[in-house]
Amino acid sequence: MRSETRLNSETPKRIILALTIVLALVSAIPASAQTGGPVYIVQAGDTLSFIASRFNVPLDDLIAANPTIDPNFLTQGQRIVIPGLEGITGVLETEIIAFGDTLRSLSRRTQVSDEQLIQLNRLVSPSELYAGISVILPVQEGQITYRSHTSAAPGESLLELAVRQGSDPWTLSSINKLDGTWDALPNDVLYSPSGNGEEGTGLPSAFLRASIAPLPLVQGGTEVIRVQVKEGYVVSGTLVDRPLRFFPFEDGQVALQGIHALLETGVYPLRLEATLPDGTRQSFEQMVLVTSGNYSSEELYVEPATIDPTVTEPENQQIYSITNLVTSAKYWNGIFSSPAVYPDQYTSLYGTRRIYKGLNSDLTATGFHTGLDFAGGEGLQIFAPAPGQVVFAGALPVRGNATIIDHGWGVYSGFWHQSTSYVNTGEFVEQGQVIGLVGGTGRVTGPHLHWEVWVNGVQVNPLSWLNQAYP
């Protein structure tokens, strides 16, 4: 009995000691960390200063909220508490805005309020959701994201639409944040929990799906625009200021478009239209982000005649007139092969900003390197990188002995400065066929192979075509 009494008398002391330790530990945790807050997942290239700026949080507060984080060393995937974001919880995930996403569709699809999206991404206007930018979305455990979307036809009620979707008007009204079951408008993109609609973003109902990749756009890149529309509609569109040329592909249509290497970085319009034979039309336009290709620069000394505008401009116009034509047939399949004997040895990369200076002359010109230069001396063989029709073979003042191959769908290859050409205009060549020999003709500083690729009237980075297959 004495032993039991002694144990009971010491118990309160032990409890008090334990509580003291817990309280001490709690008081050592910063207030912002105690209250928690949304968690941001560190992305590649993030710094603590950048994260603080992105969420408009003082850097000192961010450091205080994350005492175990080394401010000078972040690793991708680390979890960082963001203080000061009232009413926002969960994990702050990064998503690239796809073509077709609007503030309304993003809010309906993710069930995150407009106000939270605006607050987290510091949006001044809903139109700032450009395709290709990254946005922050708060994601809760068990949060439902809707992918299936549909639209009410003219004269169709929300009840009729709900029946068609295997749902009910009150559910559709709640998911899509309508004022009531009477609030649905024709062609308004509504999300459905049933999965009976189409997968996609906030595009008009004529578009079953539409996408552009890669995002964001890059100077000198090749963009692939894929569209599927309802039966009977004809697709057209423009990207920046270039009309898109669509061709049947798989279960939809596809267009390829080059982004000019000298296009200023910023946002530009991508507009798609779907038209019925009776003229009924639905369209969607969204700004897309164009980023820098991070190209270097150089100066070259050349013969003055090769940078004289009276010589260069007529030749440029001749090349433009050839490469702007579009053949409906597609001759290539898969990745292009290198046209050079030494495929991995380059003397000058695409996109390099250039200043040309005339030898013993005050004449200068500016531009960029429109292709890819391969190392190798005069007389080395040149191979066709893909099948196609020869549409030009001849001598030019700037490009020297030149060959142009039409690969179809608005895609061309150009080969400049050859010593000899083995092909003639109108001839069809196969991938890997020898089409000429390396030389030093035209505007050069030494013998080399210059190869360039045109996509719908724009020169693009040929390396992309050596590294991936385009439709």
Image: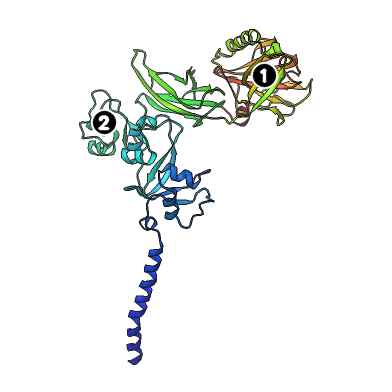
Mark 1, other Cα within 10 Å: few <14 / some 14–19 / many ≥20: many
Residue 177, given in percent of the width and then of the height, sits at 26, 37
Residue 450, given in percent of the width and then of the height, sits at 69, 21
- Which residue appears at 56% of the width and 12% of the height? 325
N-terminal of the pair, mark 2 or mark 1, is: 2
294 to the left or right of 134: right
Residue farthest to the bottom, as pictured: 2
Count of number-bearing discs: 2
Q: Is residue 420 above or below residue 19?
A: above
The label number, if any, that marks residue 356 in the structure image? 1
- Which residue appears at 66% of the width and 8% of the height? 311
Label 1 amino acid? Answer: Tyr
Q: Is residue 86 above or below residue 327?
A: below
What is the quadrant of the C terminus in the image? top right
Disc 1 is placed on an element classified as: strand
Disc 2 is placed on an element classified as: helix
- State how far apart marks 2 and 1 are (Cα): 64 Å
Answer with the quarter of the image where residue 372 lies. top right
393 to the left or right of 283: right
Q: Is residue 443 above or below residue 5?
A: above
Q: Along the line of sight, which residue is nearer the eye, 337 or 31?
A: 31
The label number, if any, that marks residue 161 in the structure image? 2
Q: Along the line of sight, which residue is nearer the eye, 90 or 325?
A: 90
Confirm or deny contact between disc 2 and disc 1 (CB under 8 A).
Answer: no
What is the quadrant of the N terminus in the image? bottom left
Residue 388 in view here: no
Q: Along the line of sight, which residue is nearer the eye, 210 or 464?
A: 464
438 to the left or right of 40: right
240 to the left or right of 277: right
- Which residue appears at 65% of the width and 15% of the height? 404
Residue 57, given in percent of the width and then of the height, sits at 40, 46
Answer with the quarter of the image where residue 331 lies. top right
